[in-house]
Amino acid sequence: MVISVSEAVRYTAAALKSISDEADREARLIVAHLSGCEPNRLIISSAAVDTEDIDPIVEKRRQGVPLQYIFGRWWFYDNEFLVGEGVLIPRQDTELLVETGLELIKGLKFPRVIDLCSGSGCIGISIACERPDARVVALEKYDAAFGYLQKNIEHIGAENVKAVKADVLEKPFGEYDLIVCNPPYIPNGDKGELSPEVLNEPHTALFGGEDGLFFYREITRLWKSALKNGGRLAFEVGIKEADLVARILESEGFTQISFKTDLIGIQRVVFGTVNSL
């Protein structure tokens, strides 16, 4: 049945009520996706949508499939990233790590940057787009995520990003002004508290050991040697992890350790400086 976009929003929201706490928002996004309209212009659109196109999406949502996977793309830092099963979905929280990284290389000419645990590449590619003079390496271990990383470099046209398939826990390489990383940081025991949508994302990108800090410890220990004198290491961190990660940086000899707080007051980024002299 073909209906107007306004009717389609109501139809979709009603179908999603028992599935999602954000049924109205999701309904607008789904109808916008199907109609080709921007979500904020649906109210004035004369487009129409077939309910036969809506129903399969609602069914996938009932199965816990994230909207981002259904759409196959998601916006992050003004760029459209391709996403799907096997890659972590870019989140707005992570934009603060991009902003911090850009601040830390401000004033440097031709900075060398590496994005560890790169996934979709949203962090490294976003930095590269803002700093065309930067040389960015995006490191990712897993096949599915690495495939999306390669696609996104091409899709966005980030010619100054090099994708490298490697394990972050193996021997470091290169010499960098900045390392950025959004590692797996959810404690293993918190699995039962996560939504079905989050659990559809790759667990290798979510869980960071018993205390959630395994990758912070190992990356700080291993990769400090890949930083130039005065180089910076910047992490995204989970809720209540900022002080613990700061202590890890301090224990490995980092100085000038600082925090960045997100819009709702959570310390979301921790960074420090390595001084080898």
Image (cartoon, rainbow, N blue to C red):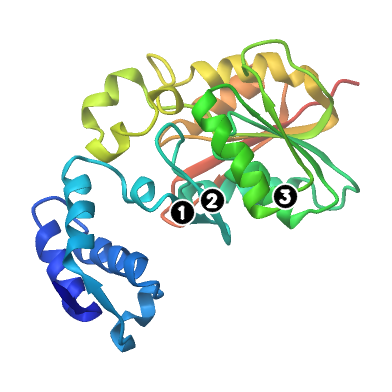
Picture residue at 55% right of the left edge, 39% below the top: 120
Picture residue at 81% right of the left edge, 31% below the top: 176
Q: Which mark is residue 204?
A: none
Any part of residue 183 in sight: yes
Left or right: where does residue 39 sit relative to residue 110?
left
Residue receiving disc 3? 158
Residue receiving disc 2? 81
| Comes first in the chain, label 2 or label 1 | 1
Tell me the SS state at disc 2: strand
Q: Nearer the viewer, residue 12 or 263?
A: 12
Mark 1 neighbour density, 10 Å: few (under 14) some (14–19) many (20 or more): some
The correct choice, above or below, for 28 with respect to 234 in the image is below
Residue receiving disc 1? 74
Quadrant of residue 137 in the image?
A: top right
Tell me the SS state at disc 1: strand
Mark 2 neighbour density, 10 Å: few (under 14) some (14–19) many (20 or more): many
Q: Are marks 2 and 1 in contact (CB under 8 Å)?
A: yes
What x and y, as percent, mark residue 95? 55, 51
Q: Nearer the viewer, residue 263 or 137?
A: 137
Mark 3 neighbour density, 10 Å: few (under 14) some (14–19) many (20 or more): some
Tell me which amino acid carries mark 3: Ala
Image quadrant containing the C terminus: top right
